[in-house]
Image (cartoon, rainbow, N blue to C red):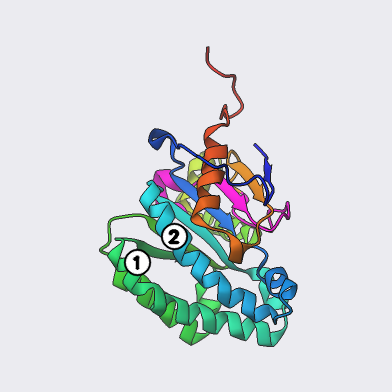
Amino acid sequence: MFSKLTAKNSVPDEIKLDPERIPQHIAIIMDGNGRWAQKRHLPRTAGHKAALTTVKEVTKAASKLGVKVLTLYTFSTENWKRPRTEVEFLMNLVSAAFDIFMPDLIANNIQVRAMGELAALPPKTLAAVNRAIADTQQNTGMILNFAINYGGRDELVAATKEIAAMVVKKQVRINEIDNKLLEKNLMTASLKERANPDLLIRTSGEKRLSNFLLWQIAYSEFVFSDVLWPDYSPAELKANIYEFQNRSRRYGGLKKG
């Protein structure tokens, strides 16, 4: 389930992926922007800005490889604790990014979606998110799913409240509450059979989930890369998928044969 790839060995010289075993849903915790900037004696904001190019290139690469859903952890509910100037920069950067990326997203038939407590975003940021969703809703290719102002624990609490309200209204009985009902009330419900990531990638060498998709990653394969997110590349993505394809996924059972 777990693996760590270092910067030195993360990209083999030749990688041949099995097109029949491409993970349908990849989720990425994009980590390391601040450290990337600090190593270059630049402000942390420079790392966030450099990360935009990585987002664009990795998104296009994932789409071309046949990934159906790419979920990017863009801003967590805990990130509001960062310095006000950094938060404001990130919110403005998100707004600008959607407009900058739109031609590429449309050209690659990519559909934008977003999940999280979106109503709490600054008006300008929320407007940019909604505009990107509307402008790409007719696209039929890969879903690019941004987790913005998202927290896994908050998501589970919200789902629990929804189900509790259904019980109070006698729309469902307690003994009818099961995994499927909970999943229908999660923020990933619209992804249907692709709601749960096959592969979770975290960059920068950290080995934490950081409150990300706590329910959905129950049986995901994890790959931890030492590469800082601004340095992450389509080649790194391919290497991570190669690692995924060399796993044996048993979902708690035994390998057949």
Residue 136 is tagged as none
Q: Residues within 10 Å of mark 1 (few under 14, many from 20)?
A: many
Question: Secondary structure under badge 1?
Answer: helix
Q: Is residue 97 above or below residue 14?
A: below
| Residue 232 falls left or right of residue 124 | right
- Can residue 30 be seen from the camera position used here? no
Give the x, y percent position of residue 163: 53, 53
Which amino acid type is shown beneath numbered disc 2?
Thr
Q: Is residue 8 above or below residue 144?
A: above
Give the x, y percent position of residue 257: 53, 12
Q: CA distance from mark 2 to mark 1?
A: 9 Å
For the point 69% across and 74% down, the residue is 37
For the point 55% across and 78% down, the residue is 120
Tell whether label 1 touches label 2 (CB within 8 Å). Answer: yes
What is the magenta segment's predominant secondary structure?
A: loop
Q: Nearer the viewer, residue 85 or 123?
A: 85
Boundaries of the magenta span: 187-214
Q: Nearer the viewer, residue 22 or 76?
A: 22
For the point 41% across and 43% down, the residue is 193
Where the N terminus falls, by quadrant? top right
Residue of label 1: 105
Give the x, y percent position of residue 55: 50, 65
Residue of label 2: 59
Residue 200 is covered by the magenta coloring: yes
Mark 2 or mark 1, earlier in chain: 2
| Residue 175 falls left or right of residue 171 | right
